[in-house]
Image (cartoon, helix red, strand yellow):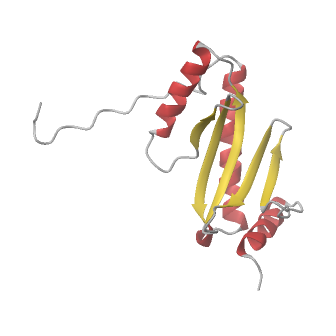
């Protein structure tokens, strides 16, 4: 019996025209332009594929506060979202992750999702390196209307 995750990673490699394999930690890492590493693995139930990366280390201060505020706004955008942002305080790093049902993926679909994820991470990384808190101002979500007219 073959492992669905191993098959998916092999199929992803075929779609990308490179040889990929699952490492001893049950993950596969894709490198993008020597600036990002996208890790692909399964969740603990082995039902979802997780994509994750470290976008950039954020120095303490107002800039970090602004970046995290923009990341929270991005997290509140409606689905489908390319990624969800997080913050790892141990390394002061902005993180991105997303998950997808393993049963709905094949190598080609995962290649598209991973490419979109990588492109989004690179956009954020470039903006942060240029001193901007996000690639573009993210509009605050509007408050839900009050259908009952309560105040």
Taking the image as shown, residue 54 lies to the left or right of residue 22, namely: left
Percent x, y of residue 41: 71, 59
Percent x, y of residue 95: 65, 38
Taking the image as shown, residue 53 lies to the left or right of residue 70, namely: right
Residue at 52% in and 47% down: 81
Q: Nearer the viewer, residue 138 or 91?
A: 91
Q: Is residue 117 above or below residue 143?
A: below
Q: Is residue 44 above or below residue 4?
A: above
Question: Residue placed farthest to the right in the image?
Answer: 19
Taking the image as shown, residue 80 lies to the left or right of residue 132, namely: left
Among the 4 quarters of the image, the one containing residue 92: top right
Q: How many numbered discs, if any?
A: 0
Question: Residue placed farthest to the top in the image?
Answer: 62
Q: Is residue 103 above or below residue 25?
A: below
For the C terminus, the quadrant is top left
Among the 4 quarters of the image, the one containing residue 58: top right
Taking the image as shown, residue 54 lies to the left or right of residue 78, namely: right
Q: Nearer the viewer, residue 90 or 135?
A: 90
Percent x, y of residue 39: 75, 51
Residue at 77% in and 64% down: 12
Q: Is residue 52 above or below residue 4?
A: above
Residue at 68% in and 38% down: 121
């Amino acid at each position: 019996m073959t492992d669905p995750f191993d098959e998916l990673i092999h199929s992803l490699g075929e779609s990308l025209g490179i040889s990929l394999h699952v490492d001893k930690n049950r993950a596969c890492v894709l490198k993008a332009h020597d600036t990002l590493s996208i890790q692909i693995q399964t969740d603990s139930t082995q039902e979802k594929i997780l994509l994750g990366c470290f976008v950039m280390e954020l120095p303490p201060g107002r800039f970090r506060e602004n970046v995290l505020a923009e990341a929270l706004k991005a997290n509140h955008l409606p689905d489908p979202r390319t990624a969800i942002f997080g913050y790892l305080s141990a390394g002061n790093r902005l993180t991105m992750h997303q998950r997808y049902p393993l049963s709905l993926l094949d190598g080609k679909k995962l290649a598209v999702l991973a490419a979109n994820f990588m492109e989004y991470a690179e956009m954020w990384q470039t903006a942060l390196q240029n001193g901007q808190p996000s690639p573009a101002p993210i509009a605050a979500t509007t408050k839900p209307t009050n259908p009952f007219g309560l105040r």
